[in-house]
Image (tube, rainbow, N blue to C red):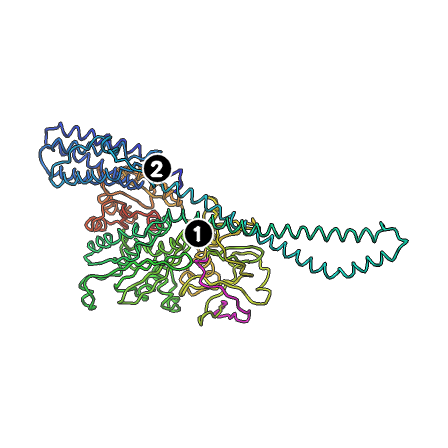
Amino acid sequence: MTSDFNKRLVATFRVETKERLAAISAGLIELEQEGVEEKRREIVEAVFREAHSLKGAARAVSMSGIESLCHAMESVFTILKQQQGAPSPALFDLLHRAIDFIDRRLLPVDAEPDPAGKSRVRELVLSLEKAVAGAPAAPPPPSPAAREYPPQEKASPADTVRISAGRLDSVLRQAEEMVTAKLAARQRAVELGEVSAALAVWEKEWKKVRPALRQARKARAAMAREDQAGPLGKLLEFCEWSHSTIKSLEGRVAQLATAAAGDRHTLGGMVDTLLDDLKEALMLPCATVLAGLPRMARDLAREQGKEVELAVSGETVEIDRRVLEELKDPLIHLIRNSVDHGIEKPAARRLRNKAERGRITVTVSLLDSGRIEIVVGDDGGGMDPARLAEAAIRQGIVPPDGAGRLGEEELLELAFRSGLSTSPLITDISGRGLGLAIVREKVENLGGTVTLLSAPGSGTTFRMVLPLTLSTFRGVLVRAGDQTLVVPAAGVETVARIPGSALRTVENRETVELGGKAVSFARLADLLQIPRTGKGGDDGLIPLFVIGSGARRIAIGVDAILDEQEVLVKSLGPQLSRVRNIAGATVLGTGRIATILHPGDLLKSAVKGAGLPSAAAHSAERGEAPRKSVLIVEDSITARTLLKNILESAGYRTSSAVDGIDALTQLKTEEIDLVVSDVDMPRLNGFELTARIRAARELAELPVVLVTSLDSREDRERGVEAGANAYIVKSSFDQSNLLEVVKRLI
C-alpha cells in the first residue's frame, strides 16, 4: 500500500473509532441506569458488537494497543451477557477509563508515540481480566503528574537519549548516500594514479630522445652564422621548456595522488565507521522475532491434537531491523508448515518409534561476508516427492509426462511453486499452496536464497542465507554487451572462466561441467535481451558466475567480470518498482549509473530461456487477470476500505455490503464472481450468509471466502460445514494470501 492510502485508511479509522467509542460510552451509561433485565441484555449485546468491530478495525491498521483493550472489553461484555443484575460501579469506572485512554492516548495522530502507552495498556488489560475473573476492579490510576513525573534524585545528565527508529532510518539513509562519495574518492585516486603512471611513461620516452636533442644542440652551435632565434633554435627551446614544465607537473600530480590516497583512506574510514555505528544502532537481536514462535507452535499444535516442542538457538545474533521485519512472514510460514504438514500426531509417531512430542528447531548463525544463516528443521514425516508430483500434475503445474523426467531435488523444488498444495481444504493454516512460495519470494527480495532438504519419515529442513543489512551490499560488477551491471554477491555461488570448448549441448540446451556436475548455461546478454559484443574475454575464455542452489543452479556467461565492491542501492521509483530481472540501480565511482540485477528473476528467466528441467519451464505465461467482480461484506468501514483497496489494486471490480442481508439483496440483482465476507455481523452473520448462498440454486457454485477474527477449530469447522471455500483469520492476515486465494477461486 502507498503512504497516501495508508494516511487515508488511518484517517478513516480515526473517524470510525470516534463513532464506536461514543456508542460504547453511551451504551455503558444507559446500561448503568437500566433496570429491566431484557433491555439490559440488548444493551450489552450492542456494546459487545461495537467493541468487536472496533477490534477488527484496529487489527486492519495494526493498532495493537486498541486491539488488546477491545479484546479485554469483549471478555467483560461476554461475562455480562451471562450474568443477571447490574454490574458494579467500579467496573463501569474501569470500562470508561479504558474508553478514555483509547480516545486520548492511543488514536494515531501526527505526533511522537506515547512512551508510557504500552505499560498503561497492560495495566488496563490486566484490570479488565481481573474483573472478568471476579476480582475487585483496580483503583483509579494516580494523577498524571504523579504517574508521569515522579520525583527523582539528583543525578548527572543522562548518557542516553530516546529517538524514534524512523529518524534513525532517515539518518542511516543519508549516511549510506556517502558511500557514493567514498567510491568517487576512490575513483579519483585511481585516476590520479593513472595520470602519474602516464607521466612516468612520458619520462621514459623523453630519456630515449635526449641523445638526439644533444646532437641537435651541437649542430646549432656549429652553425655560427645561423640566427640563434631561427626555427631550430625555437624548437629546441620549446622542448627544454616542455621538459621542465612536465617535470613540474609530474611532481604536483604525485603530490595530489598522495593527498587523494590519504583523503580516500580518511573518508573511507569515516564513512565505514559512521555506517557501522548507525547500523549497529538499528541492529536488533533475533529474539525480537523468534520469541513468539514457541507459543505460536504450541497453539497451532493444540488445535490439531499434536504435541510440539520448538527449540530456538542464536537469539542473541543481531540483524538489521529492516531485515528482521521482512523475516517475520517467512518464519511464520515455515513454522506453520512444520506443524501442519510435518509433525505427525502422537499415535502416528508411536507407530514410527518416535517420541510423541515432535521437535522443531530454529537456528540462527553468522556467516562470513556479512551474511546470516537461518535453519528451520523438524523431525516429522518429511515431504513425499511422489505426492508433490501428483499434486503438480493435478493442478496443471507439470504436464502428465513431465514428472517422470524430474529428479528428487527437482520434485522437492515443486513445493515452492505458488498454488501447489496437497491439502484439500483452504484454511488460514494450509491448503492455499502459498506458504513456501511466499517464503522464497520474501527471501529472494532480500537478496538471499532458500533451499530445502527432506527425507520421507525423517523430517524437513529449510536453509535461508540472507544479508545482515539492506541498502548497501557487496556486488560483483560484470559487463554484458556495452553495459556495466551489478550482481549481489550474496546471490552468487562462484565466479569462473571456462574455454569455449567446455560448453556442451544436452537436450537442446547449453551446459557446462562445474565441480563435477553439469550446470545449465545461459548468456546474460540473451537473458536481458541486449546485443552481444563478443563471446568471451580477450584470452578466449568465457567469464561466468553461478547463481541458485541444488537443482536450480545455472551458470550465466558475461563478457567480463570487472570487480567486486560495496554498492548502494538506488530505487527506480514507483513507475519502475518491479521490473523483471532488475532490483535497482547504483552510481559507480566514475559517476556512471549501473543496473543492479535480481538473482531470483535471472534464475526464472534462465529457466524459461534455457529449458531447465524445472516445473517452472512447463508453466504457460499468464495473461492479464480479467476484471472479475468481488462483493465485500464487512460491517467495519475501516476493514471494508482496506479490503476494497487490496482487491481493486489487483485489478478486481468491487462492491460492498454492510451485513449478510444487504449482501443477499445485491447478489439477487448484480453479477458477482466471488464473495469476501466477515463472520460476526449484525442481522445475518457470515456463516448464515454462506449457508444461504449454498442453499440458493442460482448461487450454489459462487465462491465464498470468510475473513474473520474467529480462529478456533470449531469456528473453522463451522465455516467449512457452511460451505466456505476458504477461511482466513485476520490475526494472520496477509494481503498476498488473500489475493492468491481469490485468484485460485475465480
State the image quarter where residue 71 is shown: top left
Question: In this rendering, does residue 371 appear at all?
Answer: yes
Q: Is residue 506 magenta?
A: yes
Mark 2–mark 1 distance (CA, rounded to whole Å)? 31 Å
Residue 284 as seen in the image, left or right of residue 171: left
State the image quarter where residue 312 is shown: bottom left
Label 2 element class: helix
Residue 412 as seen in the image, left or right of residue 292: right
Q: Which dot marks residue 103?
A: none
Is label 2 in contact with label 1 (beta carbons under 8 Å)? no
The residue pinned by badge 2 equals 9
Residue 137 in percent (x, y) is at 14, 36
Residue 701 vs residue 718, the one in the foreground: 718
Label 1 element class: loop
Q: Residue furthest left?
A: 85
Q: Nearer the viewer, mark 2 or mark 1?
A: 2
Mark found first going from the N terminus, 2 or 1? 2
The residue pinned by badge 1 equals 623
Q: Is residue 573 magenta?
A: no
Q: Amino acid at mark 1?
A: Gly
Q: Amino acid at mark 2?
A: Leu
Q: Which residues are magenta?
A: 489-510
Label 2 environment density (alpha carbons within 10 Å; few <14, some 14–19, many ≥20): some
State the image quarter where residue 627 is shown: top left
Residue 254 in percent (x, y) is at 62, 53
Residue 238 as seen in the image, left or right of residue 708: right
